[in-house]
Image (cartoon, rainbow, N blue to C red):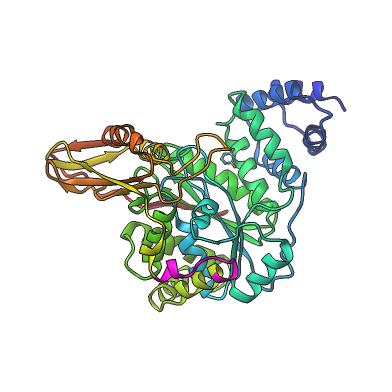
Amino acid sequence: MRMYDIIMNKRNGGVLSDEEIAFFIDGYTNGHIPDYQASALLMAIWFNGMNEHETAVLTDCMARSGDMVDLSAIPGIKVDKHSTGGVGDKTTLVIAPIVAACGVPVAKMSGRGLGHTGGTIDKLESIPGFRVSVAQEQFFQIVRDAGLSVIGQTGNIAPADKKLYALRDVTATVDSLPLIASSIMSKKLAAGSNAIVLDVKTGSGAFMKTLDDSIGLAQAMVSIGERNGRRTIALITDMDLPLGHAIGNSLEVAESVATLKGHGPADLTEVCLQLAANMLYLADKGTLDECRRLAEDALSSGAALEKLRAMVIAQGGDVSVIADTSKFPQAPVTYEVKSPSDGYITHMETEKCGIASVALGAGRESKEDDIDMSAGVVLVKKTGDKVTRGETIARLYTAKQSALPEAERLLLDAITFSDKQPAPEKLILARVSKDSVERF
Ligand code: URA
């Protein structure tokens, strides 16, 4: 088999055979196929796409290019959750404890933030002492004892994706539906859970800006999961405004703890309950309505908060910050952004809110950058709120006084004001399963 013929097949709009896909992934991972041939094939895929079978085979080969985690030492149905990335998206910190409190084990590997979006692992590391690097045996033991564990990626998960993602980044081939879907799902398949709930974000802060594109991505990922033997459901959730009020690591943990104590923001609480209900549904805990009630009970009884505490203790974190989140190290500089006009906030460009938080020190501009765990933004007002001129609309937290003007400018640029009250935005826009797309 020759890489030249595989490129020509896809360039001419053909369908790649299973053997051709396996030849490409094996050869590229072990260095026998050079970047220039891989780039040519990626561009041919960008133009001509892949059918569902090709995409599922590509994903399976990428998953098998490295370690396939075997979670069978943990009893029960393991359900993973993946979010396609957002601003202020702290859902894992709330959902994992809810699901664990309902008796479904959560053994989850999460990622770090890059660019304008945050990552669960950075957020957990803002808890003093919390260890995200845990050996596999201990990871399994924590899940068996505490019911849940969230750690950073260990071992050699989907190395083909690592190489291909870096190549796509510099060859203008990131935004291809089969390539995005296979990249995300290869890591989920390798992580070993039996079922997967996907939170596909849509809107100004998301990869996919329109509902139709988001549904298309969700359908591609659900098809990959189901074809590879994992029950998979996707919810399309709104990322046209940040989720909750807090953006930044310890600020987001504090908001998650408030949500687990029953007084979190309504939007964050609702999205977490829906995602948790779908995870419980895939774990065979009942109908979707019954699972929703189980999730609500886990929150209102305090059982979910207790699960978060158990995980923090098991992973060496200082649990006193969960009891009292004012004990988190505080940013030395705070600043209030005031509304420049009277009226309603009708739109927030979510990506700019995330960039403002990064400018304050809460995120990385390159992989090597350090994060300031206490930096970030709290949005006091959000889309739909009435404001008066001079009223505080956001609070900024930082150690870099010099970053304040840029962060303030970004936030004010991100917000659109109007005299007219906007219609309320839907939080969950669709649910995609292998049999149906329900739009809400
Ligand atoms: N996230 C991934 O892991 N891969 C993509 O291609 C896009 C988002």
Query: In the figure, is residue 241 to the left or right of 318?
Result: left
In the picture as drawn, the residue positioned furthest to the right comes out as: 1
| Quarter of the view holding residue 144 | bottom right
Q: How far across and how far down the image is residue 200, in percent?
A: 49, 47
| Quarter of the view holding residue 141 | bottom right
Q: Is residue 109 visible?
A: yes
The residue at the point 72 percent across, 27 percent down is 14
Count of numbered marks: 0
- The correct choice, above or below, for 292 with respect to 7 in the image is below
Asked if the stretch drawn in magenta spans residue 320, the answer is yes
The residue at the point 51 percent across, 49 percent down is 119
- The correct choice, above or below, for 438 with respect to 41 in the image is below
Q: How far across and how far down the image is residue 84, in percent?
A: 51, 46
The residue at the point 58 percent across, 32 percent down is 176
In the rendered image, the quadrant that contains the N terminus is top right
Front residue (pair 262, 347):
262
The residue at the point 58 percent across, 31 percent down is 174
**On the rendering, which quadrant does ligand 1 occupy?**
top right
Q: Is residue 383 visible?
A: no
Front residue (pair 53, 416):
416
Q: How far across and how far down the image is residue 394, in percent?
A: 26, 46
The residue stretch that appears in magenta:
313-323
Query: In the figure, is residue 265 to the left or right of 26?
Result: left
Asked if the stretch drawn in magenta spans residue 345, the answer is no
Q: How far across and how far down the image is residue 383, in percent?
A: 26, 45
Query: In the figure, is residue 269 to the left or right of 110?
Result: left
Front residue (pair 225, 144):
144
